[in-house]
Image (cartoon, grey):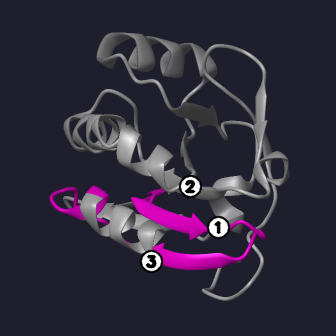
């Protein structure tokens, strides 16, 4: 399963860093940037998270919420958020199919070995819950700026 631009974004309720849960449906009326990343505290994921964190004032200016989702357990997310002073929501899909429903769970290959993992991807959801932007196979440089430009548009 995957998401497409112009279609409703699948709802989710996931445990989040710091305790409690986050739900896409609870954020209706705001833009939501849902980004999927492979693993907390790795170089690419750290650069992406810090980029979104640094741009939070601009995202807040367009009434956009940011949610980073990985398969990491909540304690790892807590540690990641504390280490880099991340103030946006990090959620764990460790025991959930959200990553699969968004089409971010893909076959990968490293040194000839095939395995399943998260494709770094981002989804922009509008105030009504409809997908308005979709980035797959994300490369970190320039990505936050591209998402911000789409959120402003």
Above or below, 49 relative to 136: above
Residue 110: x and y in percent read 25, 58
Specify the farthest residue to the left. 141
Q: Is residue 37 magenta?
A: no
Q: Which residue is mark 3?
A: 153
Q: Quadrant of residue 39?
A: top left
Quarter of the image where the C terminus is located: bottom left
Of the pair 59 and 67, the residue shown nearer to us: 59
Residue 101: x and y in percent read 71, 66
Of the pair 148 and 40, the residue shown nearer to us: 148
Above or below, 3 relative to 80: below
Q: Which residue is mark 1?
A: 102
Tell me which residue sits at (50%, 32%) in the image.
Answer: 88
Tell me which residue sits at (31%, 18%) in the image.
Answer: 84
Pointer 3 local density, CA inside 10 Å: few below 14, some 14–19, many at least 20: few
Which numbered tag is attached to residue 149?
none
Tell me which residue sits at (50%, 18%) in the image.
Answer: 76
Q: Quadrant of residue 111?
A: bottom left
Q: Which residues are magenta?
A: 115-144
Residue 147: x and y in percent read 37, 65
Whole-Å distance between the Cαs marked 1 and 3?
Answer: 23 Å
- Marks 1 and 2: in contact by CB < 8 Å? yes
Above or below, 2 relative to 30: below
Specify the farthest residue to the front. 61
Q: Which residue is mark 2?
A: 34
Quick one: SS at disc 1?
loop
Tell me which residue sits at (31%, 41%) in the image.
Answer: 45
Above or below, 119 relative to 80: below
Quick one: SS at disc 2?
strand
Of the pair 105 and 89, the residue shown nearer to us: 89
Quarter of the image where the N terminus is located: bottom right
Q: Is residue 98 left or right of residue 99?
A: right
């Amino acid at each position: 399963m995957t998401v497409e631009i112009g279609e409703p974004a699948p709802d989710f309720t996931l445990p989040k860093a710091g305790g409690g849960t986050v739900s896409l449906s609870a954020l209706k009326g705001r833009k939501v940037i849902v980004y999927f990343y492979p693993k907390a505290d790795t170089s690419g994921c750290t650069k992406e998270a810090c980029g979104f964190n640094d741009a939070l004032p601009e995202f807040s200016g367009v009434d956009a919420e940011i949610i980073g989702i990985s398969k990491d357990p909540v304690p790892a997310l807590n540690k990641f958020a504390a280490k880099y002073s991340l103030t946006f929501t990090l959620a764990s899909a460790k025991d959930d199919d959200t990553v699969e429903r968004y089409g971010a769970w893909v076959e990968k290959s490293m040194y000839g070995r095939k395995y399943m993992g998260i494709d770094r991807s981002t989804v922009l959801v509008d105030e009504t819950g409809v997908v308005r932007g979709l980035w797959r196979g994300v490369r970190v440089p320039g990505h936050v700026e591209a998402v911000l430009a789409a959120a402003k548009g």
